[in-house]
Amino acid sequence: MNKNHSVVGCIVKKKDLEKSGKVLARYEQTAGHYDSRYSTLQLDKYKFILKSYQRLEFKDGKHYTQERHKAHLIVDLGCGTGLLVEFLSSQQVFPHSRYLGIDISLAMLEFAKERCDSGSCMPTGYVQGDVTHAPLREGYGNRIFSISVLQNLDPRHLGRFLDEINRISSKNSIIFLSFLHKPPLRHMMSEVESKLKELFPRVHAILMEKSTEDAGFICFKTQ
Ligand SMILES: C[S@@+](CC[C@H](N)C(=O)[O-])C[C@H]1O[C@@H](n2cnc3c(N)ncnc32)[C@H](O)[C@@H]1O
């Protein structure tokens, strides 16, 4: 094996992986237990986010039906074991869409791939990579998710992560972002919000912490 790691044809620089080494090691070791520990919690978050999105965007069912029938390119930054794509597929949220999951942990990605090999997910692809240097071209996707990932990042890389979301999202994208919102992470809410407001014209805070411990944002990009 050379100094690079690859999955689905994408190359990740070793120096980028080293920066997130501790997080990577933790998820590599615990990947096998992730679903049994967290799947119920994560599913509650997805449901909450989806409900918030529908409430924000659609006053009537007609427009939601139109949105559903478009072919979207979903990017899931820090996709873990692929719980989100299974949820979106089973709920027929964006039924004509394709999905790309990115995660730093190969072990997590292997569970994600297995899940979709055996299930009835929308077409999927997976890439091993660091979300603060997403291995994607500009404007790649238009429905960007990152659920419970941001708290894992080095706080110094927060701005770079949000810039990456902006870079890889195309015109008229919607961004769904959540992160753990427990002490000592609470201060991050205002920091993330002010950076998002610099990047996107519409930013809505969603607080779901009572049941799920996360907080987050839904952002609408126009240009
Ligand atoms: C709490 S899990 C959430 C997984 C998934 N989003 C979900 O809803 O179940 C956090 C995930 O982020 C990934 N992760 C953490 N830091 C990352 C980074 N810098 N780049 C890519 N993935 C990262 C971890 O490997 C892990 O799979």
Image (spheres, helix red, strand yellow):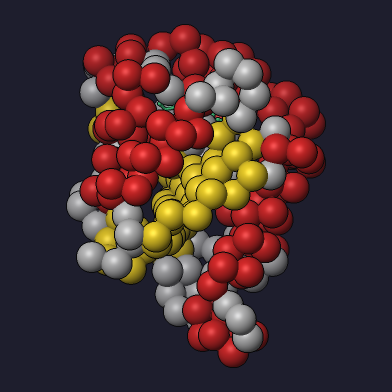
On screen, residue 72 versus residue 88, left or right, reads left
Residue drawn where x is 46% and y is 34% of the image: 190
| Furthest-bottom residue in this view | 62
Residue 191 % position (x, y): 41, 31
Q: Position of residue 183 (x, y in %)?
A: 63, 18
Q: Residue 175 in the image: state x and y as whole percent.
A: 43, 54
Picture quadrant where residue 48 is located: bottom right
Q: Is residue 129 visible?
A: no
Residue drawn where x is 50% and y is 34% of the image: 189
Residue at 56%, 34% (x, y): give it: 179
Query: Residue at left 60%, top 30%?
Result: 180
Across and down, in percent, residue 34 comes to: 69, 28
Number of labels in the image equals: 0
Up the image or down, 27 lies above or below 161; here it is above
Say which of 147 and 3 sits in front.
147
Evaluate whether residue 137 shows in this view. Answer: yes
Camera-side residue of 190 and 145:
190
Specify the quadrant of the image occupied by residue 210: top right
Indicate the quadrant containing the C terminus: top left, top right, bottom left or bottom right: bottom left
The quarter in which the N terminus is drawn is top left
Q: Is residue 73 above or below residue 179?
A: below
